[in-house]
Image (cartoon, rainbow, N blue to C red):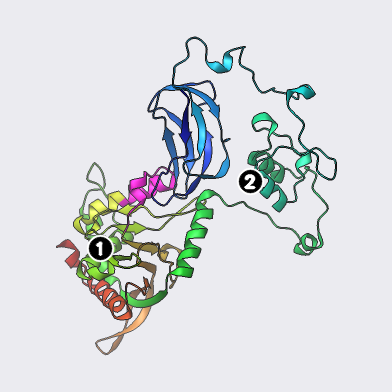
Amino acid sequence: MPIDILMPALSPTMTEGRLARWVKHEGDMVRAGDVIAEIETDKATMEVEAADDGVLEKILIAEGTDGVAINTPIARLSGDAPAAAPPIANPATPLPPAAPAAPAAAPPAPLPASDAPRLAASPLARRIAAANTIDLQTLTPTGPHGRIVRADVDAAIANPTIAKPTASTTDIANRGADRIPLNAIRRITARRLTDAKQTIPHFYVSIDIAMDALLDLRQRLNAKYPKDGDGAYKLSVNDLLIKAAAATLARVPDCNASFAGDAILRHHHIDISLAVSIPGGLITPVIQDANQKGIAVISREAAALIARARAGRLRPEEFQGGTFSISNMGMFGISAFSAIINPPQAAILAIAAVQDRAIIRDGAVVAAKIMTATLSVDHRVIDGALAAEFLAAFRDIIEEPLVLML
């Protein structure tokens, strides 16, 4: 009995994804647990495994297709192993022609008003072609049954010899531009951040923090502990800031919360999401129970998560469920910035660069290393006094960092 393989929901927030690649092909024997396809979500590229044995009878969604909704059938699996040769090799099974066949091979498509034959094309391919003024009649289809798919349009966009309709007045005035279609990560991130900015009442609180003591502690810890072997690590400033943020949330637990419509959820666990730039977008891997871990453990976990994030190999449990976010742009020399909240969380801490500044200390002007931290909060969950309490506690921990050793 045939079994439909459905587009899986690879995270609680996933509503659609891109079918990036078929690992198995029509006619292939599939065993339960075999990787059959790769799906690109808003977070990463993940593998889809077969749940049953059988033969991959039919691929219903071509690789490279965007916007495939979860639970959409993407392929059909027979329930039985082949008795002899795979079905695709059976001469009795009709196959789609590799080249244009006789007119009787398929009924002609209805003619539009122009009397030109209407080519079979996916809706996505038509949208991208229209946006880039690509004439579908000039394309060579490579999809199933002579269907034009996104890959055909992308190839045309990259090929300047493909014929295009005459540019409009708007195109001429624009004087040219490269159109870069959004990948799944950027498309879904754009939608979520737009929703977050429009529906969450953001406000922002900033504080300047003297970093001299924290930087000195980092230098002493890196000089003292091993750099080789299983226990090796090299602490970054970000590792210490993660630990400091977790310690602050333990002191001010009302900031470790989420908005839930008719209630506020104050979380028992402190899981820190890290904003990480990856090719094609942004992702937030999570350090779980960061308040219960030592700095060296946080350092090793953060390095491993960032490496897997940039390779597109994070597991769903590694980027889901954070209760608070940190976005650090200090490495770019940014003096201050405000970040957009990562829902359903209620706050995100924006970390800027450490700068040499003149400050007044004990009545005298002295040089100090100062960092500006800005907390973006959801006013439905955190009010101004609570936000100020969080930043004051964060500053106290950073300026007396030995408390992180406790």
Amino acid carrying mark 2 in the image: Leu
Across and down, in percent, residue 279 comes to 50, 50
- Any mark on residue 124, and which? 2
Across and down, in percent, residue 298 comes to 26, 54
* Closer to us: 281 or 395: 281
In the rendered image of this protein, does residue 338 appear above or below residue 138?
A: below
Across and down, in percent, residue 197 comes to 47, 68
Across and down, in percent, residue 315 comes to 36, 43
Amino acid carrying mark 1 in the image: Ala
Q: Which residue bears the numbered disc 1?
A: 246
Decide if residue 23 is in sight here. no
Which quarter of the figure has residue 140? top right
Decide if residue 230 is in sight here. yes
Q: Classify mark 2: helix, strand or loop.
A: helix
- Tell me: 247 left or right of 314: left
- Tell me: 86 left or right of 171: left
Q: Which residues are magenta?
A: 302-322
Q: Classify mark 1: helix, strand or loop.
A: helix
Q: Mark 1: give few (<14), some (14-19) or many (20+) Cα within 10 Å.
A: many
**What residue is shown at x 52% (from left), y 11% (from top)?**
85
**What residue is shown at x 78% (from left), y 21% (from top)?**
102
Q: Residue 313 in magenta?
A: yes
Q: Residue 326 in magenta?
A: no
In the rendered image of this protein, does residue 319 appear above or below residue 194?
A: above
Q: Mark 2: give few (<14), some (14-19) or many (20+) Cα within 10 Å.
A: some
- Please say if the residues under marks 2 and 1 sit with CB atoms less than 8 Å apart: no
In the rendered image of this protein, does residue 281 appear above or below residue 7?
A: below
* Closer to us: 244 or 107: 107
